[in-house]
Image (cartoon, rainbow, N blue to C red):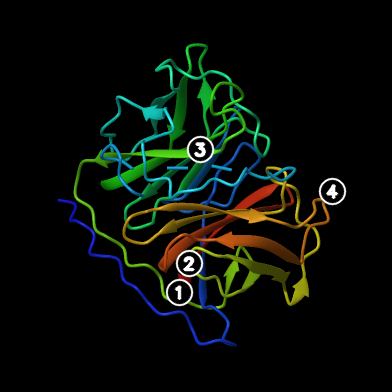
Amino acid sequence: MFTARPAVRRRALAAPGTAVALALVLAACGSSGGSSSMPGMDHGATASTSPTSKDSPSKGQMPGMDHMAGGNGLASAKDGYRLTSRNASLVAGKRTPYRFTVTGPDAKPVTAFAVDQTKRMHFYAIRSDLTGFQHLHPTMAADGTWTADLSELTPGSWRMFASFTPAGGAGKGTAFVLSRGVTVPGSGRQAPVPAAATTARVDGYTVTVQGRPMAGMSHPLTVSVTKAGRPVTSLQPYLDTYAHLTAFHEGDTAYAHLHPTTHVDGDHGGPKLAFDARLPAAGSWRLFLQFRTGGKLHTAALTLEVG
């Protein structure tokens, strides 16, 4: 049977002047426009803590970027908005739909959502050991029911995150990230978080990360992309940016979105990409960097130590 995750490890940040160690491991991310693929990682693109209710919140604009969402995403409800779903468990080993609804302060399903980074809803699935990452853009029915078509899930504990901004009502213009836990029955092992490193190769690309984020503070983070020793300057726009970066905290899977600050100008992205890193807690964070080249979407997983 799936065993509970050990308590989160806390590691001190490297001394000043030393680059933060990051481990970059290629994952996969499928999309309608093509993808690099690896078991347990996926991205689907379709049109679009502090516990308060067992699951436990969020807020926040820059052109072409997610609004800043406060909190860690571990709440299922905040400011009258609630993420509801009948799916308390999902089947392992096959594609399966996850259906959910966002209700507002009036307890009615919300059906009007603002477009954020070209989508009305960003949906994430992450296993408790920070593997199996999926980033999807679900579809909504007329009654406000959303459907996220998940790829195969491995047995264990998972958390489903919905990132959205209401287009009306009391929460108009406010970014929310709400989540719920899901169990996938069966035998499964916890995978250790990969060791840290400053660079890694992804589909022939070498990614180098520089920065020293501190918990609860805004710090710049720079990602450089090269191939065969040459700077890459042909990154293509993806969700109104040249790279989408999402982070999850080891131990509790708390969520954070690292906001891109690089200006988008056609298929000319790179070699350097700038991000505003605001991670709410110290410890190990698993970052998932998604970028597109030649119509192909790549996903790299990064381990970041935050002091």
Q: Residue at x 39, y 48 (%)?
A: 126
Label 3 is placed on what type of residue? Answer: Phe
Of the pair 307 and 225, the residue shown nearer to us? 307
* Callout 3 crowding tier (Cα within 10 Å): few <14, some 14–19, many ≥20: many
- Residue annotated with mark 4: 266
Instruction: State the SS at label 2.
Output: loop
Mark positioned earlier in the residue sequence (2 or 4): 2
Label 4 is placed on what type of residue? Answer: Gly
Per the model, the C-alpha gap separating discs 1 and 3 is 26 Å
- Residue annotated with mark 2: 215
Q: Position of residue 101 (x, y in %)?
A: 42, 23
In the image, is residue 167 above or below residue 266? above
In the image, is residue 136 above or below residue 187? above
Q: Position of residue 169 (x, y in %)?
A: 56, 21
Per the model, the C-alpha gap separating discs 3 and 4 is 29 Å
* Callout 4 crowding tier (Cα within 10 Å): few <14, some 14–19, many ≥20: few
Mark positioned earlier in the residue sequence (3 or 4): 3
Q: Residue at x 46, y 79 (%)?
A: 13
Label 2 is placed on what type of residue? Answer: Ala
Mark positioned earlier in the residue sequence (2 or 3): 3
- Residue annotated with mark 3: 176
Q: Is residue 205 visible?
A: no
**Rendered-image quadrant of the C terminus:** bottom left
Instruction: State the SS at label 1.
Output: loop
Contact check, label 2 and label 4, Cβ < 8 Å: no
- Residue annotated with mark 1: 307
Q: Position of residue 31 (x, y in %)?
A: 59, 40
Mark positioned earlier in the residue sequence (1 or 2): 2
Mark positioned earlier in the residue sequence (1 or 3): 3
